[in-house]
Image (tube, rainbow, N blue to C red):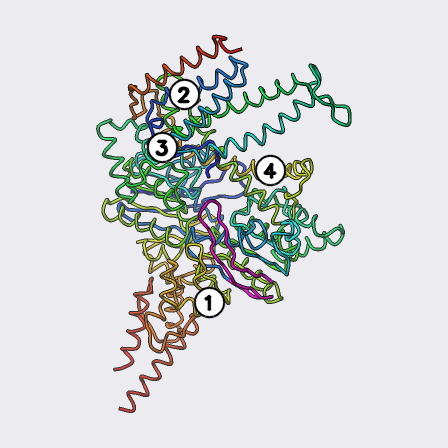
C-alpha cells in the first residue's frame, strides 16, 4: 500500500517544483499506470516511492509518502527496497554483473537472504519471468528484451510487495514490450505483486493496467480506473497524452449519437462495440 | 563481438577452475615476459596463450585480438627501430636514419613483451565472470568490497563505452565529419569535440548504475555476503604447479 | 534516389541482410518494418555508406556507396539516430546546429541564416544547453542540426521512440512537411500508428530478407505477411480486418466512422425493403 499526501518536491537548484501537491493512494494488488508528457514529473514520482527522493536526489521535500506504513523520509532506500523494487529504462546500466545468475544473486547476497533459501529464490524468479534457460548466459550476449527480463527477475527475487518500473519498455520493440507487460501481469495476478508503471505506450497501458494516473507539469491531472480516465478526452489532450485509436473511434461514434457506453480499450472490445451498434439498428 | 575484455559463455576446463587459480595463472603467464629477455620463450608464452584461448572455445576471438595487437605492435616496432641508433648498423634509410641490429632485437622484444603480457589478462577475463573475480578479491584477498566493485564495474563498462564511442563516431560521420579520412592527425583533431557526448553518456550510465546498486543493498554488503562457493580441485593444483614451473624456468636463466 | 541491387551484408559468417533489392524514388515516404534483430538498422546504415555491402550494390543519387566516401554522401543525406545523445556535442542548441553546417556551408552568414531558420521551425531557444533538456527536445535539436543541412534523403532510425505524444507529433509533422516539399524519407519505426499516419509505402524485413514491399494500406491488411514478420497492424486496420465484410477498406478513424454509417444505412434500407 502506497500513500502520498501533499507531496511536493523541488530538486536542489531546480527552478520549479518537479512534483506539486500529489495525493495518491495505490492499493495492494493494483496494476497502476502513470502517463504524461516528458518533464511532467513521472520519474520523480517513482523516485519518491522508492526513496531515491529525498535520499539520493536532494532537494526541498514537503508532504508525506508512506510505503507499507514506512515513512520514506525516515527509512533508508535499502530498507525501503525490501518493500519496493525498482526497474529502470536504461537497460545496460542497471545490470551490475556479467552473468545472469550473478545479477540475480547481487541483491539476495546483500540483503543476507539465508543460504538455503537463495537457490530457491533464484530459480523462482527466473521461472516467473520465463528466463530459466538464460541462467548461465553472459549478460552481454542477451537481447534488450531478455536483459530487461533479467532486471525484473533480479528485483522479483527480493520478493518486494511493490515493483516500480520507469519506462521499462522504452528501448524495446512492440513484441518484447508486450512480453514484459505479460510478465508483469502474471506477477500481479499470480503473486499479488503491486505494479506501479510509468509508460508512454498508451495502448499497452490501456490493455494491462487497472488504474491510470495522468501527470502534467508536476501535478496529478487525472487518476482512476482506466476507462474513467480515458473518458476525459479534453484533459488528456491538454496533458499531451493521446488515446488509443479505438477509444478515439468510440468518441467519434458517440459524438454522432451512434454509441453510448464504456470506452473500448482493445480491438476485441471495439469489435463488440461496432457489432452492438449494427445489431441495435436492426431492431 | 563484445569487445575483447568481456566474459564468454562456456564450460571448458579453464572456465571451471577456481577464480583465484585463473588470476594466478594470468600473473604467471605475464611474469616470464619480464623475468626473461629470450625472444623464443616469449613467443612460446604467446603460443601458450593462444592454445589456452582455443581450449576455452575462444580461438577465433584470440586470433582477432592477436591481430589487433599485431597491428598496434607494428607501429610501435617501427617507431622503436627508428629511434634506436646504437649498435651494429644493418642498413640506412634515405634521410640518414640508421637501422641497427640491436635496435631491431630490442624493439622486437619490446612488442613481444607487450603482446605476451596483455593476452593473459584478456584470457582471464574471457573465462571468468567479473562477479567471480570480485568475490575472490573480497573473500580470499580481503580487498574491501567497494574497491572490488570499482574494478569489476570498470571492466564491465569498457565494452559499453567502446560501443558508445563507435556509435558517436558513426553519428558524426553521418553528418559529414570526415572520420573516414586517412590523415591520422586530422582524425584525432576531429575526435576531440566528441569527448563531450561520451563523457555525458558515461556519467549518466554510471549514475544509473549507482542507483541500481544502491537500491539492491550495495551498502549492506559485507565480506561474507558472497553466495557462491569456489572449491580447489585437482585441476587447480596442476595449473598452479605448472605456473610455478613456468616462473621458475624463466627466472632460472637457463635460457640466454 | 536510392537503389539496392541484390545487396548482402554480414558481420561474421552469417548474413544480416541477404539479397535485398528495391528502389526508392524522389519524394517518397517509405517505412521500414520488422521486429528487433530483423536487420532494419543495418539496412538503413547501408543507405548512406556507414556500412558497405559485402556483395551487391547500393547507389544513392547515382553514387555507388562502395566507391564514394561516407562523409561525401553525408552532404546530401541526413541520418537521425535513435539516441540523439550520440550526435549532440556542442553546449548550445545554436552551436550544435552550426557545427553540423560547418562541413556543408562555407559561408558564415548563410550558416547563421539556416540555423535561425531551424530554431524558428522547431521553436527552440538557441541559447539552451542540450544536456539539460528533455529527451524529446534533444531529439528535436538533433533533427534541427540535420535538417539545417537540407538533405535530399532523410534516414530516420526510430525517430519517435522515447518521446511523448506531443513531441512525436512535432517531429513527424516537420518531417511530413519536408516530405511534401520533396525530401525523400526512409524511416524505421516500431510505432504502427505513426507508420499508418505518415508513411505511404512500407518495406517489410524479416530475418534479413525483404519479404514485403507495398503501400502501407495494403501491408497493414496483409495478415499473413505481418504474421511472418512478427508485426502487429495499427489498431484501426486491425479492427477493420476483424470486422471483415464492408469494413476492410477502413484505415483511419474517419473512414471507420463512415463505414459504420454506411453499414447502418444498408441495414436501414434492408429493413425497409422487407
- Circle 3 marks a residue in which chain? B
The numbered mark, 2 or 4, whose residue comes first in the sequence reads: 2
Q: Quadrant of residue A106?
A: top left
Prevailing SS of the magenta stretch: strand
Q: Position of residue B87 (x, y in %)?
A: 69, 14
- Classify mark 1: helix, strand or loop: helix
Query: Residue C237's x, y, as percent?
Result: 39, 68
Question: Nearer the observer, disc 2 or disc 3?
Answer: 2
Whole-angstrom CA distance, mark 2 to mark 1, is 57 Å
Tell me the tag on residue B196.
4
- Marked residue nearer the N-terminal end (2 or 3): 2
Q: Tell me: C54 left or right of A248.
A: right
Instruction: Read off the residue under disc 3.
Output: B216
Check the image and report above or below for B86 versus C196: above
What residue is disc 2 on?
Answer: B23
Residue count near mark 3 (Cα–Cα under 10 Å), binned few <14, some 14–19, many ≥20: many
Question: Would you say the residues marked 1 and 3 are in contact, meaning their CB atoms lie under 8 Å apart?
Answer: no
In terms of sequence position, does the residue under pointer 4 or pointer 3 come before the other?
Answer: 4
Q: Farthest residue toward the front?
A: B90
Q: Nearer the viewer, mark 1 or mark 4?
A: 1
Q: Residue at x 52, y 40 (%)?
A: B164
Cα separation between marks 1 and 3? 46 Å
Query: Crowding at label 1, few (<14), some or many (≥20) Cα neighbours within 10 Å?
Result: many
* Vertical order, C254 against A127 (above or below): below
The Cα atoms of the two marked residues, 2 and 4, are separated by 36 Å
What is the spatial separation of the Cα atoms under label 1 and label 4, in whole angstroms?
A: 40 Å
SS of the residue under disc 4:
helix
- The residue lying toward the viewer, choosing from A20 and A87, is A87
- Camera-nearest label, 2 or 1: 2
Say if labels 4 and 3 share a chain: yes
Residue that badge 1 annotates: C216
Amino acid at each position: 500500500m502506497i500513500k502520498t499526501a501533499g507531496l511536493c518536491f523541488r530538486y536542489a537548484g531546480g527552478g520549479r517544483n518537479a512534483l506539486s501537491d500529489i495525493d495518491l493512494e495505490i492499493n495492494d494488488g493494483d496494476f497502476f499506470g502513470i502517463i504524461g508528457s516528458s518533464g511532467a514529473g513521472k520519474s520523480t514520482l517513482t523516485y519518491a516511492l522508492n526513496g531515491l527522493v529525498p535520499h539520493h536526489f536532494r532537494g526541498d521535500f514537503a508532504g508525506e509518502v508512506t510505503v507499507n506504513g514506512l515513512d520514506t523520509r525516515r527509512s533508508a532506500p535499502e530498507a525501503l527496497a525490501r518493500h519496493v523494487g525498482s526497474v529502470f529504462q536504461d537497460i545496460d546500466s542497471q545490470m551490475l554483473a556479467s552473468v545472469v545468475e550473478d545479477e540475480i544473486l547481487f541483491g539476495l547476497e546483500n540483503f543476507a537472504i539465508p543460504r538455503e533459501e537463495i537457490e530457491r529464490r533464484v530459480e523462482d524468479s527466473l521461472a516467473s519471468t520465463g528466463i530459466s534457460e538464460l541462467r548461465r548466459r553472459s549478460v552481454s550476449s542477451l537481447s534488450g528484451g531478455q536483459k530487461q527480463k533479467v532486471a525484473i527477475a533480479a528485483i522479483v527475487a527480493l520478493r518486494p510487495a511493490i515493483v516500480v518500473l520507469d519506462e521499462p519498455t522504452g528501448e524495446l520493440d512492440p513484441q518484447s514490450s508486450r512480453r514484459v507487460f505479460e510478465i508483469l501481469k502474471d506477477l500481479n495476478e499470480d503473486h499479488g505483486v503491486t505494479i506501479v508503471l510509468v509508460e508512454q505506450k498508451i495502448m499497452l497501458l490501456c490493455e494491462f493496467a487497472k488504474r491510470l494516473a495522468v501527470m502534467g507539469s508536476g501535478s496529478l491531472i487525472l487518476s482512476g480506473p482506466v476507462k474513467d480516465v480515458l473518458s476525459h478526452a479534453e484533459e488528456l489532450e491538454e496533458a499531451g497524452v493521446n488515446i488509443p485509436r479505438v477509444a478515439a473511434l468510440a468518441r467519434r461514434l458517440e459524438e454522432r449519437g451512434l454509441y453510448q457506453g464504456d470506452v473500448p480499450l482493445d480491438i476485441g472490445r471495439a469489435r463488440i462495440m461496432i457489432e452492438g451498434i449494427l445489431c441495435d439498428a436492426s431492431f | 563481438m563484445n569487445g575483447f575484455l568481456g566474459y564468454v559463455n562456456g564450460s571448458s576446463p579453464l572456465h571451471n577452475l577456481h577464480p583465484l587459480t585463473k588470476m594466478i595463472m594470468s600473473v604467471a603467464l605475464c611474469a616470464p615476459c619480464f623475468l626473461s629477455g629470450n625472444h623464443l620463450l616469449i613467443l612460446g608464452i604467446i603460443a601458450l596463450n593462444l592454445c589456452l584461448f582455443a581450449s576455452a572455445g575462444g580461438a577465433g576471438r584470440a586470433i582477432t585480438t592477436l591481430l589487433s595487437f599485431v597491428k598496434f605492435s607494428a607501429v610501435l616496432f617501427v617507431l622503436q627501430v627508428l629511434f634506436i641508433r646504437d649498435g651494429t648498423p644493418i642498413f640506412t634509410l634515405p634521410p640518414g636514419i640508421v637501422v641497427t641490429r640491436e635496435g631491431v632485437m630490442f624493439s622486437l622484444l619490446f612488442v613481444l613483451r607487450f603482446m605476451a603480457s596483455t593476452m593473459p589478462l584478456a584470457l582471464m577475463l574471457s573465462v571468468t565472470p567479473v562477479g567471480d573475480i570480485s568475490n575472490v578479491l573480497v573473500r580470499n584477498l580481503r580487498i574491501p568490497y567497494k574497491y572490488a566493485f570499482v574494478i569489476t564495474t570498470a571492466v564491465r563498462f569498457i565494452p559499453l563505452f567502446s560501443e558508445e564511442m563507435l556509435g558517436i563516431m558513426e553519428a558524426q560521420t553521418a553528418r559529414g565529419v570526415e572520420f573516414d579520412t586517412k590523415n591520422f592527425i586530422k582524425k584525432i583533431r576531429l575526435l576531440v569535440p566528441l569527448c563531450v557526448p561520451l563523457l555525458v553518456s558515461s556519467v549518466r550510465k554510471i549514475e544509473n548504475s549507482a542507483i541500481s546498486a544502491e537500491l539492491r543493498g550495495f551498502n549492506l554488503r559485507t565480506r561474507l555476503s558472497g553466495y557462491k562457493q569456489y572449491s580447489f580441485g585437482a585441476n587447480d593444483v596442476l595449473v598452479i604447479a605448472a605456473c610455478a614451473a613456468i616462473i621458475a624456468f624463466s627466472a632460472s636463466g637457463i635460457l640466454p | 534516389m536510392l537503389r539496392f541491387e541484390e545487396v548482402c551484408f554480414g558481420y561474421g559468417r552469417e548474413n544480416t541482410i541477404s539479397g535485398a533489392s528495391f528502389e526508392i524514388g524522389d519524394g517518397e515516404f517509405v517505412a521500414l518494418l520488422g521486429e528487433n534483430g530483423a536487420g532494419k538498422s543495418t539496412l538503413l546504415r547501408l543507405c548512406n555508406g556507414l556500412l558497405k555491402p559485402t556483395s551487391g550494390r547500393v547507389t544513392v543519387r547515382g553514387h555507388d556507396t562502395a566507391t564514394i566516401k561516407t562523409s561525401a554522401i553525408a552532404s546530401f543525406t541526413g541520418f537521425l539516430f535513435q539516441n540523439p545523445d550520440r550526435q549532440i556535442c556542442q553546449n548550445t542548441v545554436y552551436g550544435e546546429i552550426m557545427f553540423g553546417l560547418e562541413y556543408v556551408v562555407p559561408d558564415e552568414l548563410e550558416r547563421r541564416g539556416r540555423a535561425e531558420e531551424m530554431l524558428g521551425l522547431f521553436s527552440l531557444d538557441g541559447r539552451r544547453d542540450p544536456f539539460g533538456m528533455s529527451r524529446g527536445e534533444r531529439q528535436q535539436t538533433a533533427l534541427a542540426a540535420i535538417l539545417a543541412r537540407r538533405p535530399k534523403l532523410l534516414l530516420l532510425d526510430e525517430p519517435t521512440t522515447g518521446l511523448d505524444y506531443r513531441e512525436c507529433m512535432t517531429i513527424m509533422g516537420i518531417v511530413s512537411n519536408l516530405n511534401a516539399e520533396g525530401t525523400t524519407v526512409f524511416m524505421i519505426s516500431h510505432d504502427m500508428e505513426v507508420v499508418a499516419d505518415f508513411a505511404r509505402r512500407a518495406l517489410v524485413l524479416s530475418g534479413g530478407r525483404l519479404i514485403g514491399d507495398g503501400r502501407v494500406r495494403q501491408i497493414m491488411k496483409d495478415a499473413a505477411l505481418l504474421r511472418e514478420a512478427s508485426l502487429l497492424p495499427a489498431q484501426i486496420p486491425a479492427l477493420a480486418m476483424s470486422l471483415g465484410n464492408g469494413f476492410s477498406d477502413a484505415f483511419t478513424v474517419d473512414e471507420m466512422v463512415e463505414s459504420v454509417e454506411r453499414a447502418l444505412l444498408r441495414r436501414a434500407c434492408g429493413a425497409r425493403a422487407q
